Amino acid sequence: MLEIAKSIRYIHSMDIILYSPDIKIALQYLFLDSDLHAKIMFEGVFAWWSMEALIYDYEDKDLLTKCTYEASISTFANLFDKVCFDGHNENTPKRLVDDARQLIKRCRAEHPKRQPAMEDVVKEMETWNLT
């Protein structure tokens, strides 16, 4: 999941917003490569596009609400939760489970100002002792 968080951070740094309204669709494009690195395929739009679409009264307003950095972070949280906690995690240290659940909860915050930026998500995940 750290690799996916780093990928999203990089994509956001290029002013691209990921678009994946349905986590079930996103999970269809999650896989490991031959080096066991996580890979995921998302659609994306340039951040400026959603701003211009608002200005020029783009007709699909629902799409615009899903094309934000905050929506990308929330989708990451949903993916993180689905991948890591839908199965069993009895062998995972309780501290790590608690840390991950807290991060997922913050990424899902309803108010966008309460969500961490992907930069902060990556920094926090890098501090976790995974050994």
Image (cartoon, rainbow, N blue to C red):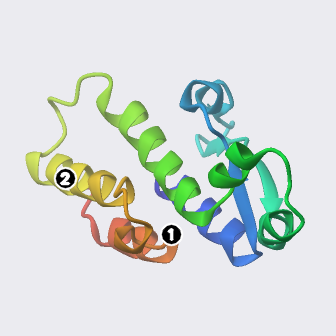
Please tell me whether mark 2 sits on a helix, a strand or a loop: helix
Please tell me whether mark 1 sits on a helix, a strand or a loop: helix
Q: Which of the two labelled residues, at mark 1 and mark 2, occupies the earlier sequence position?
A: 2
Residue 50 in the figure: left or right of residue 68: right
Which residue is more in the foreground, 74 or 29? 74
Residue position marked by numbered label 2 in the rendering: 96
Residue 6 in the figure: left or right of residue 85: right
Residue drawn at x 67%, y 70% as measured from the top left: 12
Residue drawn at x 69%, y 77% as measured from the top left: 13
Q: Is residue 20 above or below residue 106?
A: above
Give percent across and percent down for residue 39. 66, 43
Rate crowding at label 2 as few (under 14), some (14 to 19) or many (20 or more) other CA atoms within 10 Å. Answer: some
Give percent across and percent down for residue 129. 24, 63
Amino acid type, mark 2: Leu
Q: CA distance from mark 1 to mark 2?
A: 19 Å
Rate crowding at label 1 as few (under 14), some (14 to 19) or many (20 or more) other CA atoms within 10 Å. Answer: many
Give percent across and percent down for residue 33. 68, 37
Q: Is residue 3 above or below residue 119?
A: above
Which residue is more in the foreground, 54 or 7? 54
Which residue is more in the foreground, 111 or 119? 111
Q: Quadrant of the C terminus?
A: bottom left
In this view, the residue farthest toward the right is 56
Mark 1 or 2, which is nearer the eye? Answer: 1
Query: Quarter of the image holding residue 93?
Result: top left
Residue drawn at x 78%, y 71% as measured from the top left: 51
Residue 63 in the figure: left or right of residue 131: right
Residue position marked by numbered label 1 in the rendering: 118
Count of marks overlaid on the render: 2
Q: Is residue 107 above or below residue 127?
A: above
Amino acid type, mark 1: Met
